[in-house]
């Protein structure tokens, strides 16, 4: 009889054991502790004596002592992290500095650092378990990349600590996180959709540049909204009634196409990263389309009130891209969204882009 099937079965069994241990290796210290506590309990029950009781109480109290040591170690750790600037570009590396120090009097082991999927490091030091002697400091210099556009916390966000045997684990949020605003890539992903919308609506191409306004006032007024230019305020009406009103634009200005932006909130952090990244990239693609066509665009969004921005050239596009795009992050309430829509004064094609369904529509 050949022994080859027996050897193959033995190798297969060993492989299954290795895979099982690898899958449950995090639970192995706890399983061993429970087994040791059970053995100590049985030993003290049948043998008695000083040694058995000392052994029993040492094993029994170990988790509580470890918990106290971990908490004390947490207050002995100082963490510092920094990057070059807080305004970053998507998928572009920046210099990152991370420092962790033990200012206490006891050694600290089993330190793990964590970041979420929006951040990546050239040399991922978070894969290692760190140990710190009293007064020891570890400094790490590497490169950080933010993979999604939007405003969020980057770098190392959480840490966990464990006892020397890996039985007790406690996780903590890091207070010294990095709040960044990541700019999206400028692409043409919205070009086809914008072309389709403009083909279906009458779009007047002969629109004057609106860096300045006409000197003569219009007859119609509306309530002042944050972001309205001061030269539009009807000051005589304000002096008479105390209410700030602005004049509606003339015919030439109202023919400018408008873009209404409505973001949304997402409880799922990962889905929020993905949807906001696409939302911002799509928005800047729309704005860049009109900039390339040399046609002005009036943008409306809500952030503590109705805000607007006029894009009439490369300079205003750059200002919107660098400064105002990051402010489009607050989902308006139902009444605020109504206020946003009522503030639209464009008599030309008005585009609406809502993050909830990611559809480009018209009013």
Image (spheres, rainbow, N blue to C red):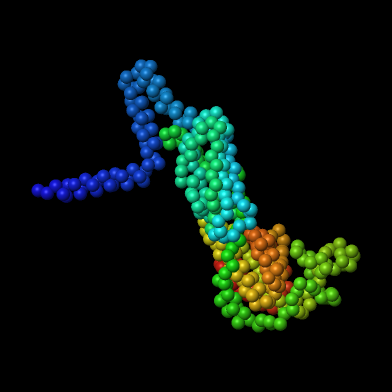
Return the residue nearer the eye: 278 or 88.
88
Q: Residue at x 80, y 73 (%)?
A: 213
Estimate the x, y position of residue 353 in percent, counting from the top left. Answer: 61, 69
Q: Is residue 83 left or right of residue 239?
A: left
Q: Residue at x 87, y 66 (%)?
A: 235
The image shows residue 52, relative to residue 236, as above or below, that is above
Quadrant of image for the C terminus: bottom right
The image shows residue 15, relative to residue 360, as above or below, that is above
Dividing the picture into quadrants, the one containing residue 14 is: top left
Q: Is residue 339 visible?
A: no
Q: Residue at x 59, y 78 (%)?
A: 195
Estimate the x, y position of residue 233 in percent, counting from the top left. Answer: 83, 67
Dividing the picture into quadrants, the one containing residue 42 is: top left
The image shows residue 288, relative to residue 336, as above or below, that is below
Q: Is residue 99 left or right of residue 27?
A: right
Return the residue nearer the eye: 5 or 255.
5
Estimate the x, y position of residue 198 in percent, counting from the top left. Answer: 62, 79
Q: Residue furthest top?
A: 49
The image shows residue 324, relative to residue 256, as above or below, that is above
Estimate the x, y position of residue 277 in percent, counting from the top left. Answer: 56, 62
Return the residue nearer the eye: 336 or 5.
5
Q: Is residue 168 visible?
A: yes
Q: Residue at x 54, y 31 (%)?
A: 134
Dividing the picture into quadrants, the one containing residue 275 is: bottom right
- How many badges with numbers are in the image? 0
């Amino acid at each position: 009889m050949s022994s080859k099937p027996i050897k193959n079965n033995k190798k297969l069994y060993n492989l299954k054991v290795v895979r099982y241990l690898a899958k449950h290796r995090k639970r192995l210290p706890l399983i061993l502790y429970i087994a040791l506590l059970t053995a100590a309990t049985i030993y003290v029950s049948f043998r008695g004596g000083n040694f058995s009781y000392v052994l029993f109480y040492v094993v029994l109290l170990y988790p509580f002592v470890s918990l106290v040591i971990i908490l004390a170690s947490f207050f002995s750790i100082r963490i510092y992290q920094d990057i070059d600037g807080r305004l970053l570009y998507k998928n572009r590396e920046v210099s990152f500095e991370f420092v962790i120090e033990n200012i206490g009097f006891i050694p600290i082991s089993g330190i793990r650092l964590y970041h979420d999927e929006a951040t990546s490091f050239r040399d991922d030091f978070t894969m290692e378990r760190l140990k710190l002697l009293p007064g020891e400091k570890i400094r790490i210099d590497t490169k950080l990349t933010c993979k999604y556009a939007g405003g969020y916390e980057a770098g190392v966000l959480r840490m966990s600590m464990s006892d020397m045997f890996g039985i007790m684990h406690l996780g903590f949020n890091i207070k010294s996180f990095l709040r960044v605003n990541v700019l999206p890539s400028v692409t043409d992903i919205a070009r086809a959709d914008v072309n389709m919308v403009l083909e279906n609506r009458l779009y007047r191409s002969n629109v004057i540049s609106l860096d300045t306004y006409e000197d003569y006032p219009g007859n119609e007024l509306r309530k002042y909204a944050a972001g309205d230019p001061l030269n539009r305020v009807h000051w005589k009406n304000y002096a008479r009634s105390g209410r700030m009103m602005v004049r509606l634009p003339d015919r030439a200005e109202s023919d400018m196409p408008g873009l209404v932006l409505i973001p949304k909130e997402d409880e799922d952090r990962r889905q929020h990263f993905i949807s906001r990244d696409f939302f911002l990239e799509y928005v800047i693609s729309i704005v860049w389309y009109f900039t390339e066509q040399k046609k002005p665009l009036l943008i409306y969004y809500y952030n503590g009130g109705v805000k607007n921005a006029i894009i009439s050239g490369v300079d205003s596009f750059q200002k919107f891209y660098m400064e105002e795009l990051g402010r489009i992050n607050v989902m308006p309430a139902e009444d605020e969204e109504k206020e946003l829509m009522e503030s639209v004064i464009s008599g030309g094609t008005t585009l609406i882009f809502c993050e909830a369904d990611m559809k480009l529509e018209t009013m």
